[in-house]
């Protein structure tokens, strides 16, 4: 089983609206996955959960 296969609980941001330009996030112990909502089979970016949490914190604090 790959890391991608372990990811569950896929969800998209409430702020995504209906435009279709959004990503989904899924999780498994220690990892997070990010994929394109419109093309789920195109690939999944799998990252360490701590790194993803740091990224989200940076986005929320407007560091980008």
Image (cartoon, rainbow, N blue to C red):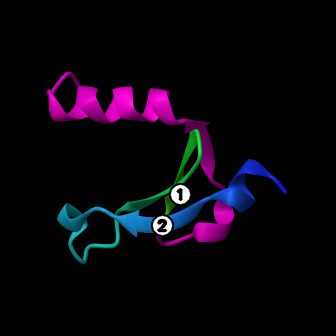
Q: Which residue is mark 1?
A: 35
In the figure, 19 relative to 24: above or below?
below
Left or right of 33, for residue 16 = left
Gap in Å between the C-alphas at discs 2 and 1? 9 Å
Q: Earlier in the sequence, mark 2 or mark 1?
A: 2
**Side of 54 relative to 44 (left or right):** left
Tell me: residue 38, above or below residue 50.
below
Q: Which residue is mark 2?
A: 10
Residue 22 image offset from top left, x and y in percent: 36, 62
Q: Dot 2 lies on which element?
A: strand
Residue 46, position as x, y percentages in the image: 62, 43
Classify the position of the N terminus by image quarter. Answer: bottom right
Which quadrant of the view contains residue 8?
bottom right
- Whether the residues at callouts 2 and 1 have beta carbons within 8 Å, the answer is yes
Callout 2: 10 Å neighbours few (<14), some, many (20+)? some
Looking at the picture, does residue 62 appear above or below residue 6?
above
At 24% across and 33% down in the image, what residue appears? 59
- Whether residue 20 sits left or right of residue 63 in the image: it is right
| Secondary element at tag 1 | strand
Q: x%, y% of residue 41?
A: 67, 68
Tell whether 7 sits left or right of 53. Answer: right
Q: Residues within 10 Å of mark 1 (few under 14, many from 20)?
A: many
| Residue at 73% across, 49% down | 3
* Residue 2: x %, y % from top left: 80, 52
Q: Which residues are magenta?
A: 37-64
Q: Quadrant of the C terminus?
A: top left
The foreground one among 55 and 40 is 55
Q: Residue furthest top?
A: 63
Q: Is residue 58 magenta?
A: yes
Residue at 58% across, 42% down: 31
**Which quadrant of the view contains residue 63?**
top left
């Amino acid at each position: 089983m790959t890391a991608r296969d372990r990811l569950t609980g896929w969800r998209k941001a409430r702020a995504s609206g209906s435009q279709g330009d959004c990503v989904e996030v899924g999780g498994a112990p220690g990892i997070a996955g990010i994929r394109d909502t419109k093309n789920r089979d195109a690939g999944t970016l799998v990252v360490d959960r701590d790194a993803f949490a740091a990224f989200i914190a940076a986005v929320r604090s407007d560091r980008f």
